[in-house]
Amino acid sequence: MISPIRWQGDRLLLLDQTLLPAQEVERPYTTWHDVAEAIRTLVVRGAPAIGVTAAFGVALAARASAARDADGLMAELEEAIKGLGATRPTAVNLFWALERMRRVALAHRHLPVAALGQRLLAEAQAMLDEDVAANRALGAHGATLVPERARILTHCNAAALATAGYGTAGGVIRAAHERGRLSLVWVDETRPVMQGSRLTAWEMVKEGIPHRLISDVAAAFVMKRGEVDLVVTGADRIAANGDTANKIGTYGLAVLARHHGIPFYIAAPVSTIDPSIPTGASIVIEERDPAEVRGVAGRQTAPAESPVFNPAFDVTPADLITVIITERGLYRPPYHFT
Ligand code: MRU
């Protein structure tokens, strides 16, 4: 199994996703500051993966602490939680994971500092294991929606690399493949950071899953030719009404799918649902470095002077989403998450 996040001995190991597919390098992390930087710079990315990674970041903060008492340690943990939370704004899994770590720390603040560090590490490991289990479960639910010899289009990377393992949209694809239902995966390259071509295609090759890479702009044509049976993507945050933030380009695919009469599915663990926001209108959309759009793979392809708009995510309205697939089962519109 592809494991992008692992604890080994006294350190966190992250598979550096900025180097894929050219190089497979695992990097060691022993401080929360470095973990935060890894999240910010996309060494690790994908909503569930950054949540689990941040949880290990909090555990690292506790393990490195020289605090003598509970108040001192809690102050350090709050600083780590704030710093880790300031890395990326859109995926709710990050804040969900940090809040869970805060609750565990508060509940066990009577423990000696070293013991609390161990307890927090165990919690982070539990979150990692639960994420893989959730993905297997949602994959199995999602596979029931996949027809025989299906041709599935996916966007970005919502597979093993974006999670603790197995994947969400990628989990549905894996589960369909394991059940012999899959004919082909259309992999959108996913400009500007190329998570589709660099990461999803890499996973498909590694696991022998039949796939074909397309530029994002080819999706409409492939649908028009009748070569897509369903679209499935992941999610970064799902509002109470089902509006869903995911990688930029997802909304366009949902519109295209509706036009062509193709089902459009979102696959995500319940930790991606944010019932505190009624609609997608209040989801903060991260804007990233203009250089990502002015160039491709480090090579400049636009004038340095050209102003750029580079939103990393968009919001797909709930009424374009046929089913939301979670580990608890399938949700159909109208969505009312509580
Ligand atoms: O900017 P990224 O690569 O973190 O964006 C990732 C996505 O948009 C994924 O589709 C989403 O996080 C779901 S991952 C299971």
Image (cartoon, rainbow, N blue to C red):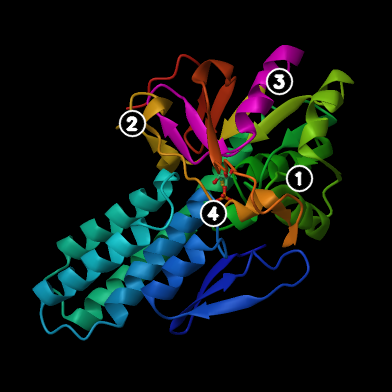
| Badge 3 or badge 1: first in the primary sequence | 1
Residue at image location 85% in from the left, 30% down from the top: 149
Whether residue 332 is visible here, answered yes or no, is no
Evaluate if marks 1 and 4 touch, with contact meaning CB atoms under 8 Å apart.
Answer: no
The Cα–Cα distance between marks 3 and 4, rounded to whole angstroms, is 29 Å
* Residue wearing tag 1: 189
Residue at image location 25% in from the left, 82% down from the top: 65
Residue at image location 28% in from the left, 60% down from the top: 82
Mark 4 CB lies closer than 8 A to ligand 1: no
Residue 198: percent from the left, percent from the top? Answer: 74, 56
Say what amino acid the circle numbered 2 marks.
Pro
Residue 269: percent from the left, percent from the top? Answer: 48, 41
Mark 3 surroundings within 10 Å by alpha-carbon count, few (fewer than 14), some (14 through 19), many (20 or more) = many
- Label 4: which secondary element: helix
Q: Tag on residue 132?
A: 4
Residue 233: percent from the left, percent from the top? Answer: 63, 36
* Residue wearing tag 2: 275
Say what amino acid the circle numbered 3 marks.
Ala
Evaluate if marks 4 and 2 touch, with contact meaning CB atoms under 8 Å apart.
Answer: no
Image: 161 above or below 322? below
Give the foreground label among 2 and 1: 1
- Name the foreground residue: 270 vs 281: 281
